[in-house]
Amino acid sequence: MALTMRGALLAAVLPMMVALPGELVPAAAQMSAATAGNRHLYSETADAAADIAAAKKVARRENRRILIEFGGNWCGDCLILDGYYHQMPNAELIAKHYVLVHVDIGHMDRNMEIAAKYHVPVRRGVPALAVLDARGNLLYAEREKEFEQTSPAAVTALLNRWKA
């Protein structure tokens, strides 16, 4: 019983720790918080091309950009990056200016043609990002693994740079 209560308490507290602006949180705590929040960001059964097509419709209708994140549920850095998306001001920037699409790359064996289409070198590692305009034209493709080990401030800078 004590172990179960402790686990529940950690699951509740760790996400709040990561969300505190300006606080330094150890990577292990970030990882625990991110994985506690959503272990299934990347659907192994989703049709990524259809998800991007649907995102284009929303983006055109609402004059927003499309943020594509390539990764996998096994990727700790991908889960941490998603946690940063839920922190302020990033959550507000995404809600106002972006349609977010998570694309599962499996173990470098799924949706590789989509990554290639947007010139995202996922074989170098994930998470890997692309930003499209509302019509689906590529505006930005991550090349140097900027978001493999990142910070909330770096995510904010990217979102501000490419917002619609």
Image (tube, rainbow, N blue to C red):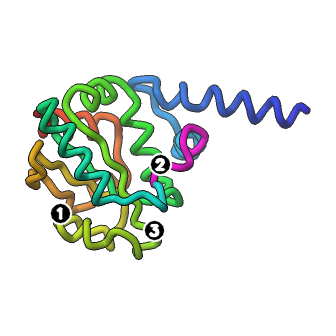
User: What is the number of the mark on residue 41?
Assistant: 2
Q: Crowding at label 3, few (<14), some or many (≥20) Cα neighbours within 10 Å? A: some
| Amino acid on which disc 1 is placed | Tyr
Identity of the amino acid at label 3?
Gly
For label 2, the SS is loop
Is 104 left or right of 141, judged from the image as shown? right
Task: Please state the total of marks drawn on the protein image.
Answer: 3
Q: Counting other residues with Cα less than 10 Å from the Cα at mark 2, is it few (<14), some (14-19), or many (20 or more)?
A: some
| Distance of label 2 from label 3 (alpha carbons) | 12 Å
Range shown magenta: 35-42
Q: What element carries label 1?
A: loop
- Residue at mark 1 to residue at mark 3: CA–CA distance: 17 Å
Residue with the mark numbered 1? 118
* Dominant SS type (magenta): loop
Q: Which label's residue is closer to the chain start, 2 or 1?
A: 2
**Mark 2 or 3, nearer chain start:** 2
Q: In this view, does 131 lie above or below 128?
A: above
> Do labels 2 and 1 touch, CB within 8 Å?
no
**The magenta stretch spans residue 40:** yes
Inter-mark Cα distance, 2 to 1: 20 Å
